Image (cartoon, grey):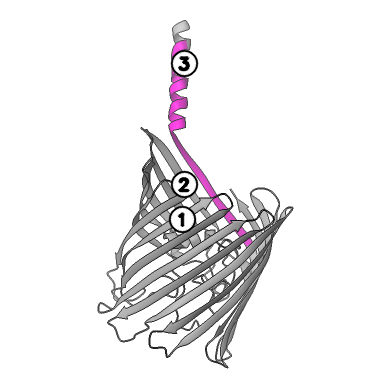
Amino acid sequence: MKKLLIATAALAMVAGTVQAQSSVTVYGKIDAGYSDRKAEGTSGTEAKGKSIAFNAHETSRWGVRGTEDLGGGLKANFVIETQLGDDNSNSAATLQGTLPVNDEALGGRALWAGVSGGFGEVRVGYQNAFSKDYVAGFSASGGSNVIGDPTMAAGRAVEKTARLGLLDSRYTAVSYASPAMSGFTVKAMIVSDKQDSDNTTAAKKDAKGQEFALQYAQGPFAAAVAYGSYEVSGVLPTVGNMSVTLADSALVHEQDLMSIYASYDLGVAKLFAKYGNVESKQKGGSATTDGEATSTVVGVRVPVGNATFIANYATGDYESLAGTTKYDDSGYQLGLEYALSKRTKLYGIYGKTDTDITATTKEKDSQVAFGLIHNF
């Protein structure tokens, strides 16, 4: 009997050790709300969209993340994350400014594995560019999908006149992040994303490049600088990201990004600022859209009890390399979040963007959204 008790205790200790060495967590969020958006183009054409939306403010998602203790201070890590809610299924919902449909495939938001330890962390697979994380992390609205922030890829007015937004993308890549040293973290990413499809259009989506970042966080102050250089084979990428939809073997698109971010927590309020510059050059093909885009956003979050007030103001512009085309953007977001618990909140946000095409011609876009977000 005594031997049986000893054996049982030993097995329990082993099981407890194994459980402590490996863990898997299911997580996610649901944004269930209502969105009303109106866009007016330069020709006077007006588009409207009113609908129940699952991504009006934040993007609904679910994911699985895990870690295993490999011993010697090493850990194996993985993440699989998928978007929930297809808001691109009809013309009205298309105006909600949501993320691409392919994010709704399993692992469409993240699919990577890596190793971490005293040296830092290495990740291999489908993951956010550093600039994408910073766009949301250094925003008063958390990178809201609502109109009003020109650094977001989505959200141009109905005619979406060709110009470039800041990079806001995910890639198949190898990335490295150093351990924090006196508040500083160094990051590097090598992108190799080749996606040729064998069909009648010979669709092509080949992206390669690199991105580097330096971030700092100490006490109430945080800042980051990111630089990326990318090259895409195929037709022009869509506004704000590097996705390619059709083939053109003679065309290569180059894009260089420099962005700066900062935040400071005053206690009674948290201040945010970000600046970005994108230079774009096209080689080959029948059209040339070489140009430069800049964007500046300042914002503030003010907590008052369970409520948090949000305000963002943004300006931006695009100018062709030849100087023959120039667009000026401005926008803002005003919102309120109310925490029902640590994981659940209500929200209401209004956003507006204006784009000057000429001295007398504008594109206008506005949106109001409200709903409930539950994190799990």
Mark nearest the camera among 2 and 3 is 2
Q: Picture coordinates of residue 146 (x, y %)?
A: 59, 69
- Residue beneath the point at 72% across and 53% down: 306
Give the Cα distance between marks 1 and 2.
11 Å
Task: Kindly indicate whether the residue at mark 1 contacts the one at mark 3 (C-beta within 8 angstroms).
Answer: no
Q: Residues within 10 Å of mark 1 (few under 14, many from 20)?
A: some
* Residue 7 shown in magenta: yes
Give the Cα distance between marks 3 and 1.
50 Å
The magenta stretch spans which residues?
6-32
- Residue beneath the point at 37% across and 62% down: 211
The single residue placed furthest to the top in the displayed view is 1
Q: Picture coordinates of residue 75 (x, y %)?
A: 39, 39
* Foreground pick, 319 / 341: 319
Can residue 90 be seen in this snapshot? no
Q: Secondary structure at mark 2?
A: loop
**In this picture, is 2 found above or below 258?**
above
Looking at the image, tell me whether mark 1 or mark 2 is earlier in sequence order. Answer: 2
Residue bearing the label numbered 2: 182
**In this picture, is 72 found above or below 234?**
above
Q: Which amino acid type is marked by label 1?
A: Gln
Residue bearing the label numbered 1: 215
| Side of 302 relative to 174 (left or right) | right
The disc label shown at residue 8, or none: 3
- Residue beneath the point at 46% across and 16% down: 8
Looking at the image, tell me whether mark 3 or mark 1 is earlier in sequence order. Answer: 3
Q: Quadrant of residue 257?
A: bottom left
